[in-house]
Image: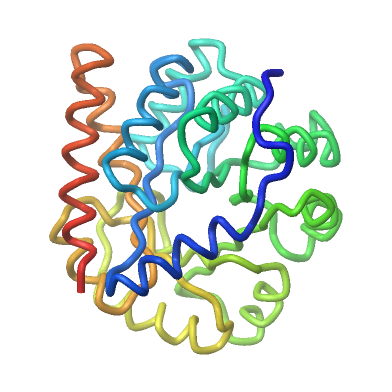
Amino acid sequence: MTGGRSNAQPGRLTRAFERARSENRAALVIYLCAGDPDLATSVRLMKAIARAGADVIEVGVPFSDPTADGPVIQRASERALASGTTLPGVLDAVAELRRESDVPVVLFGYYNPILAHGEAEVAERAAKAGVDGFLVVDLPPEEAGSFCTELKKQSLSFIPLVAPTTSNERLALVARFADAFIYYVSLTGVTGAATDLPLAAKRAEEVRARVGLPVAIGFGVKTAEDARSISGRADGVVVGSAVCSLIAAASDADDAMANVSALVGELKRACAR
């Protein structure tokens, strides 16, 4: 595996949200599925996304049986798997990004590949590659203790998911594992579906008040108008399906980079308060 930073720091994520707040805007978090259409193109796209102004990049680790992803990201994951993308390959791609950019990186995916490679090994390799944190969709807090212990050893963050159905009692449990930010799922459904974003922004404020950490809203945020509708109340705005759609529709890597960069710039402007 190629080298990266010797010690990834959760502080990078914290500083990203602090910087956005000081600039009176929401932080922009951009998702792409690593390996779609191939890892070399993904590295180019990550660099372009960072240059276009993303505050955080969520790097999706493709998985054959996703439960939270809508059809757009499912298809991106299928293309990535078909191109031979693996978790070690994704970490190599992050290490390549780190040669140029200090943008915070969160790995977004499912627990099975982590379990297959071993929690300790994955955490160690991720830290060496320059990852800042993990968001594991299907790892509930009741089962996250051992992995969080390994992440903590490597100074990596665990990013919990909170849903509209999360009770205040469960929120207190979730918050015990968080140190950078909370990812608020704006709907009881999959990525890319329609949702009531103003209602989600209100709930995000309530979550922030209870946990004392920044809250980013994802699942259902697609356009600059969507981002603008929640940027005044959310600490972060997460966009993924719209990015994956542009990559899928592009004629080649240069076309994908141009179109994704333009979208990121538009979204960044929409995050201003």
Number of numbered discs visible in the structure rendering = 0
User: In this picture, is 13 found above or below 243?
Assistant: below
User: In this picture, is 110 found above or below 81?
Assistant: below
| Percent position of residue 157, x then y | 67, 57
Q: Toward the viewer: 201 or 112?
A: 201
Tell me if 173 is positioned left or right of 39 in this view. Answer: right
Tell me if 206 is positioned left or right of 63 in this view. Answer: left
- The quadrant of the rendering that contains the C terminus is bottom left
Q: Toward the viewer: 159 or 103?
A: 103
- The quadrant of the rendering that contains the N terminus is top right
User: In this picture, is 70 found above or below 140?
Assistant: above
Tell me if 197 is positioned left or right of 122 in this view. Answer: left
The part of the image, by quadrant, that contains residue 40 is top left
| Percent position of residue 51, x then y | 31, 38
| Percent position of residue 143, x then y | 79, 58
Q: How is the image coloured?
A: rainbow
Q: Toward the viewer: 200 or 256?
A: 256
Tell me if 108 is positioned left or right of 49 in this view. Answer: right
Q: Residue at x 66, y 86 (%)?
A: 169
Q: Residue at x 46, y 67 (%)?
A: 184
Q: Toward the viewer: 46 or 175?
A: 46
Q: Residue at x 18, y 30 (%)?
A: 259
Q: Residue at x 77, y 41 (%)?
A: 123
| Percent position of residue 267, x then y | 21, 52
